[in-house]
């Protein structure tokens, strides 16, 4: 159904990487969220007051807060799509993360309010009346929330939207919460002396708060600059390596300025005897191809390396083996050698994992140097230590 709605209201709906199309997807999801949640709020508040159920009333106000979430989704989509300006040369894409953070705060607020009401209900319990009509209407609301989860998740994946993913998770929790309400209303008929309604309301509140904190944590990580998706890094490196003339990559950095606004830089190793003009054309073509296929603005730095000198390659392989023996995650790149009778300079970058402590990294790097010198006393080793944050 959501695919038919998308085709009906969004022109050029297949161009999900275009900012204007992406905005229309978010606005459509927000409008649908407002309509569905207002309908559920009115339905559940009527039922809750009719049967005197705090759990149903709490669930109704949770739906009302979801309406606020939908408004935030729409506003966030509009603001994050603003063009880059002098003050924000990389655009306003991260405003979507701010919108997601606001959504998480709204969710937490509702959960805290529900805890207060549930405690009061536990202390002063009231009998919850039960009817077939109530069960049918609540069951119908489950269907609405399942559909909302489905379309929010579908759109969030289609346009890589954090705020719509949060809305989808919230809808899934609503399904769980409403199911718990139905179970509590039914159980309360058999255990009238136990404040089942208040207890279930409390459990639902805890679930909502937990969800809010989870979304907030993930969003703060994005705002702070969390590591990019491992599959994206893997695919990006593979796309570069497959390019003719590029024999290796290292020092890949990926900066996320909001969905669809990713900037990356990488060092590409090329043969040192290659034609400079030809290699420049290859790199320029690769940057444009990556932008077209992956939507990433990539800058490639060219690193010439020796590939035909057997002596250099043999020593490089020997040092690579030594580095891995010292630590299995150590690698080297940008290897250069100046050969002499009494002294041989070996210059290279040693790539180390980011989770090593500074003193441990220094100790292991010194061990690499000592192991290399043990191979030949003429070796003079110059190491530049790189820290790998992406698993390069």
Image: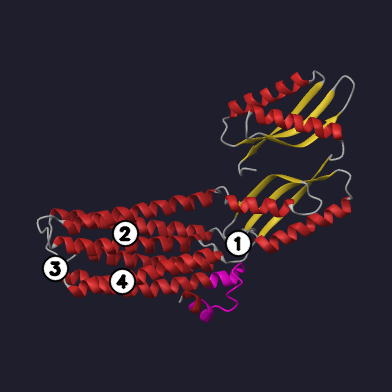
Q: Quick check: marks 2 and 4 in contact, CB under 8 Å? A: no
Magenta range: 5-24
Rendering coords of residue 368 (x, y %) = 69, 25
Residue 379 visible, this angle:
yes
Query: In the image, what residue occupies the spot 31% across and 71% down?
Result: 141
Residue 73 or 310: which is nearer the viewer? 310
Residues packed near mark 4 inside 10 Å, few (<14), some (14 to 19) or many (20 plus): many
Rendering coords of residue 30 (x, y %) = 45, 71
Mark 2 vs 1, N-terminal side = 2
Secondary structure under tag 1 reads: loop
Q: Which of marks 3 and 2 is in front?
A: 3
Q: Distance between the residues labelled 2 and 1?
A: 31 Å
Query: In the image, what residue occupies the spot 89% across and 44% down?
Result: 273
Q: How far apart are marks 1 and 4 (CA)?
A: 34 Å
* Residue farthest to the left, as pictured: 193
* Residue farthest to the bottom, as pictured: 8
- Answer whether residue 23 is magenta in the image: yes
Residue 94 or 248: which is nearer the viewer? 248
Residues packed near mark 2 inside 10 Å, few (<14), some (14 to 19) or many (20 plus): many
Q: What residue sits right under mark 4 in the picture?
A: 141
Q: What residue sits right under mark 1 in the picture?
A: 260
What is the total number of numbered labels drawn onto the structure image?
A: 4
Mark 2 vs 4, N-terminal side = 2
Q: What residue sits right under mark 3 in the picture?
A: 129
Q: How is this picture coloured?
A: secondary structure
Q: How far apart are marks 1 and 3 (CA)?
A: 51 Å
Image quadrant in which the N terminus is located: bottom left
Disc sitting over residue 110 in the figure: 2
- Answer whether residue 248 is magenta in the image: no
Q: Nearer the viewer, mark 2 or mark 1?
A: 1
Residue 60, quarter of picture: bottom left
């Amino acid at each position: 159904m959501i695919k038919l709605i998308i085709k009906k209201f969004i022109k050029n709906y297949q161009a999900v990487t275009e900012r204007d199309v992406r905005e229309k997807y978010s606005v459509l999801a927000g409008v649908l969220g407002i309509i569905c949640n207002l309908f559920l709020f009115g339905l559940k508040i009527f039922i809750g007051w009719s049967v005197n159920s705090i759990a149903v009333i709490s669930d109704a106000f949770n739906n009302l807060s979801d309406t606020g979430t939908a408004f935030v989704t729409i506003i966030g989509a509009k603001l994050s799509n603003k063009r880059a300006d002098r003050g924000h040369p990389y655009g306003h894409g991260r405003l979507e993360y701010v919108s997601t953070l606001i959504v998480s705060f709204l969710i937490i607020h509702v959960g805290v309010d529900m805890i207060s009401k549930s405690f009061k209900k536990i202390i002063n319990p009231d009998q919850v009346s039960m009817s077939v009509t109530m069960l049918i209407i609540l069951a119908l609301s489950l269907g609405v929330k399942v559909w909302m989860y489905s379309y929010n998740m579908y759109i969030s994946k289609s346009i890589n939207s954090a705020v719509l993913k949060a809305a989808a998770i919230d809808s899934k929790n609503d399904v769980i919460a409403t199911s718990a309400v139905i179970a509590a209303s039914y159980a309360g008929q058999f255990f009238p002396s136990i404040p089942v309604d208040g207890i279930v309301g409390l459990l639902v509140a805890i679930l909502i708060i937990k969800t809010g904190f989870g979304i907030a944590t993930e969003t703060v990580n994005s705002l702070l600059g969390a590591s990019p998706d491992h599959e994206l890094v893997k695919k990006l490196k593979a796309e570069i390596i497959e390019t003719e003339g590029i024999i290796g990559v290292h020092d890949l950095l990926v900066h996320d300025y909001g969905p669809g606004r990713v900037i990356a830089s990488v060092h590409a190793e090329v043969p040192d005897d290659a034609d400079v003009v030809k290699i420049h054309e290859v790199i320029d073509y690769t940057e444009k191809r990556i932008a077209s296929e992956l939507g990433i603005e990539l800058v490639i730095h060219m690193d010439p390396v020796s590939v035909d000198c057997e002596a250099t390659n043999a020593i490089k392989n020997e040092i690579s083996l030594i580095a891995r023996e010292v630590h299995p995650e150590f690698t080297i790149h940008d290897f250069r050698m100046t050969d002499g009778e009494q002294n041989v300079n070996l210059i290279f970058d040693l790539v180390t994992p980011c989770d090593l402590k500074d003193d441990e990294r220094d100790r292991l790097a010194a061990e690499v140097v000592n192991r290399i010198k043990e191979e030949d006393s003429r070796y003079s080793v110059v190491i530049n230590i790189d820290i790998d944050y992406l698993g390069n």
